[in-house]
Image (cartoon, rainbow, N blue to C red):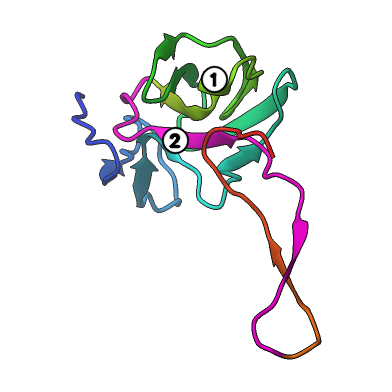
């Protein structure tokens, strides 16, 4: 029997068990219905996608996929507007992979991509995770908003994709 399985679709198989020849039995043989669900990997929802890390600090970025069968392999890539790194070092167990990443220079901030494969197929859309620099500490400035003698304090923070000196 040959089965043509389509990733992501349920495959129904009807099997009929036949009474073996020569066996006289009062048992009633019933058809057996099986449903098999096989999927190429897809990103698991509700994962942490933003990681805040300082220069020369490492962070473990976790990528989890949903797949059936769960025996998957992973690959990782880093990219930003300046450069790309392929085949980042990572460890994997089942449907989870962890990449340890450390930005050394301001141009090392960007996006990590994770793809998984299993025997059914390749992940169509990568999982992605953004590594950003911490924002500068909140500063306070005194400002005169009116002719009143009372000063008003405005709290602000600088947010940037790439780190800036505060």
The x, y position of residue 139, in whole percent, is 76, 55
Q: Is residue 64 visible?
A: no
Of residue 47 and residue 36, the one placed in the foreground of this image is 47
Q: Please name the residue that numbered disc 2 is placed on.
A: 127
| Figure quadrant of residue 23 | top left
Magenta portion: prevailing SS class: loop
Q: Please name the residue that numbered disc 1 is placed on.
A: 108
Of residue 21 and residue 69, the one placed in the foreground of this image is 69
Disc 2 and disc 1 in contact, CB within 8 angstroms: no
Kindly identify the residue that appears in the image at 68 percent across and 89 percent down.
147
Location of residue 17 with respect to 144 vertically, above or below? above
Kindly identify the residue that appears in the image at 43 percent across and 10 percent down.
86
The x, y position of residue 145, in whole percent, is 64, 81
Give left or right: position of 43 versus 109.
Answer: left
Disc 2/disc 1 C-alpha distance (Å): 19 Å
Of residue 32 and residue 162, the one placed in the foreground of this image is 162
Question: Badge 2: how crowded within 10 Å, few (<14), some, or many (20+)?
Answer: many
In what quadrant of the picture does the C terminus appear?
top right
Give left or right: position of 87 versus 14.
Answer: right
The x, y position of residue 39, in whole percent, is 36, 36
Of residue 126 and residue 100, the one placed in the foreground of this image is 100
N-term mark: 2 or 1 = 1
Using the image, tell me which numbered label, if any, was put on residue 18: none
Kindly state the secondary structure of the residue where label 1 is placed.
helix
User: Range of the magenta residues?
Assistant: 119-147
């Amino acid at each position: 029997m040959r089965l043509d399985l389509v990733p992501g679709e349920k495959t129904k198989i009807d099997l009929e068990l036949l009474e073996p020849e020569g066996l006289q039995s009062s048992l009633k043989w019933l058809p057996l219905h099986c449903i098999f669900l096989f999927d190429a990997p897809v990103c698991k929802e509700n994962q942490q996608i933003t990681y805040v890390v300082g220069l020369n600090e490492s962070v473990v970025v976790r990528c989890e996929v949903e797949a059936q069968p769960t025996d998957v392999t992973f690959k990782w890539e880093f990219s930003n507007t300046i450069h790309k790194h392929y085949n980042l070092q990572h460890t994997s167990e089942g449907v989870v992979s962890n990449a340890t990443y450390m930005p050394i220079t301001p141009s090392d901030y960007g996006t990590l991509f994770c793809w998984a494969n299993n025997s059914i197929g390749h992940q169509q859309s990568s999982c992605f995770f953004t590594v950003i620099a911490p924002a500068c500490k909140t500063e306070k400035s005194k400002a005169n908003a009116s002719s009143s003698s009372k000063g008003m304090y405005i709290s602000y923070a600088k947010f940037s994709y790439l780190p800036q000196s505060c």
